[in-house]
């Protein structure tokens, strides 16, 4: 192709990316400006694309209710605890499937584990409620929510870690054995550093699910524990939803995952590419 054709293709590609960027960023932009508007402006028939009256005090208003800060803390506790457990158990299970259970049996076990992540959560919502309600810790507890999220995060963590461990060169482990390393030393000093970017990716995926999950959180939380997705509908005044406070609180709740992705993006890119290096 000549240079004119190459330039045309490049311009078309850049134009498509620009349009796609606008469609992607606009909802976030509208969420942000809505968080700065008064209620009357939000409810007007003609939408405004920049606040006529700035209300930055909306962000202070969301924390007038002490439940707002507590819901964010509850979400952090549940997300961090569930991510640590999912990553720990998923790493051990993934290593076992990658190194010790291979062939037809290993593939079937791995597929069975992944299939547990595929069923729709709403299909088990009622049995899960009665199951946890019958336990000593009940439904309104951190333990119930953390344990329930393991049902969905652990299969995903196990499957991905199995793929990452399979891509890690076995020869390096054999060389470590020849140097006198024990299997445990080899696992921690040789194998884990090789798949560390993949572990970061798995941790982020598990954390995002636990951070944003609403269905089971709405079912299993109450007064003692209430995560932020369950707290958002409480921003009302009579029968009216205070959308400016809803948007302001949502913007605040977006900060932890956004900051994590910014700081860990290098590991995320490397981790998500581990499973396709040999592809």
Image (cartoon, rainbow, N blue to C red):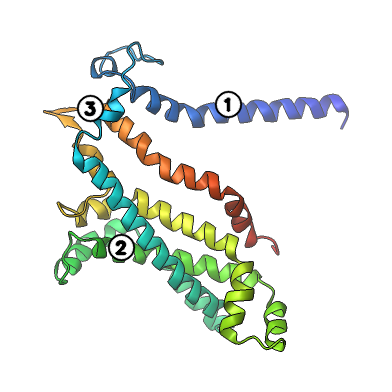
> At 61% from the left edge and 50% from the top edge, which residue is drawn?
266
- Neighbourhood count class around disc 1 (C-alpha, 10 Å): few under 14, some 14–19, many 20 upward: few
Contact, mark 1 vs mark 2 (Cβ under 8 Å): no
Q: Quadrant of residue 186?
A: bottom right
Q: Nearer the viewer, mark 1 or mark 2?
A: 2
Q: Mark 3 to mark 2: distance in Å?
A: 30 Å
Q: Residue 14: horizontal and vertical position, in percent? A: 68, 28
Q: Mark 1 to mark 2: distance in Å?
A: 40 Å
Q: Is residue 115 left or right of residue 237?
A: right
- Identity of the residue furthest to the left in this view: 238
| Depicted 194 relative to depicted 240: above or below | below
Mark 3 vs 2, N-terminal side: 2
> At 36% from the left edge and 62% from the top edge, which residue is drawn?
82
Contact, mark 3 vs mark 1 (Cβ under 8 Å): no
Quarter of the image where the N terminus is located: top right
- Taking the image as drawn, is residue 216 in sight? yes
| Depicted 170 relative to depicted 226: above or below | below
Q: Mark 3 to mark 1: distance in Å?
A: 31 Å
Q: Residue 65: horizontal and vertical position, in percent? A: 19, 36
- Neighbourhood count class around disc 3 (C-alpha, 10 Å): few under 14, some 14–19, many 20 upward: some
Q: Which mark is residue 19?
A: 1
Element class at badge 1:
helix
| Depicted 171 relative to depicted 199: above or below | below
Residue holding disc 3: 242
Residue holding disc 2: 146
> At 58% from the left edge and 26% from the top edge, which residue is drawn?
19
Mark 3 vs 1, N-terminal side: 1
Mark 1 vs 2, N-terminal side: 1
Q: Residue 227: horizontal and vertical position, in percent? A: 26, 49
> At 54% from the left edge and 76% from the top edge, which residue is drawn?
95
Q: Is residue 180 left or right of residue 129?
A: right
């Amino acid at each position: 192709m000549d240079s004119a054709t190459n330039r045309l293709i490049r311009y078309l590609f850049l134009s498509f990316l620009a349009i796609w960027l606008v469609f992607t960023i606009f909802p976030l932009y509208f969420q942000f400006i809505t968080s700065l508007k008064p209620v009357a402006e939000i409810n007007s028939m003609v939408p405004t694309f920049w606040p006529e009256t700035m209300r930055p005090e909306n962000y202070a208003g969301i924390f007038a209710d002490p439940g707002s800060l507590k819901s964010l803390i509850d979400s952090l506790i549940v997300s961090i605890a569930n991510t640590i457990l999912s990553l720990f158990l998923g790493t051990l299970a993934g290593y076992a499937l990658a190194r010790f259970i291979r062939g037809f049996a290993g593939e079937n076990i791995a597929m069975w584990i992944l299939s547990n992540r595929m069923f729709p959560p709403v299909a088990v919502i009622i049995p899960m409620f009665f199951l946890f309600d019958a336990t000593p810790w009940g439904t309104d507890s951190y333990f119930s929510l953390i344990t329930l999220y393991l049902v969905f995060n652990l299969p995903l963590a196990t499957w991905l870690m199995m793929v990452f461990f399979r891509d890690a060169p076995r020869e390096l482990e054999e060389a470590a054995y020849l140097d006198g390393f024990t299997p445990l030393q080899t696992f921690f000093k040789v194998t884990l550093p090789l798949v560390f970017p993949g572990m970061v990716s798995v941790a982020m995926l598990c954390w995002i699910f636990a951070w944003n999950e609403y269905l089971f959180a709405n079912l299993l939380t109450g007064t003692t524990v209430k995560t932020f997705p369950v707290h958002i509908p409480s921003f009302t005044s009579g029968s009216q939803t205070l959308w400016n406070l809803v948007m302001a609180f949502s913007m605040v709740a977006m900060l932890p995952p956004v900051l994590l992705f910014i700081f860990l993006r290098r590991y995320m890119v490397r981790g998500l590419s581990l499973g396709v290096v040999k592809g």
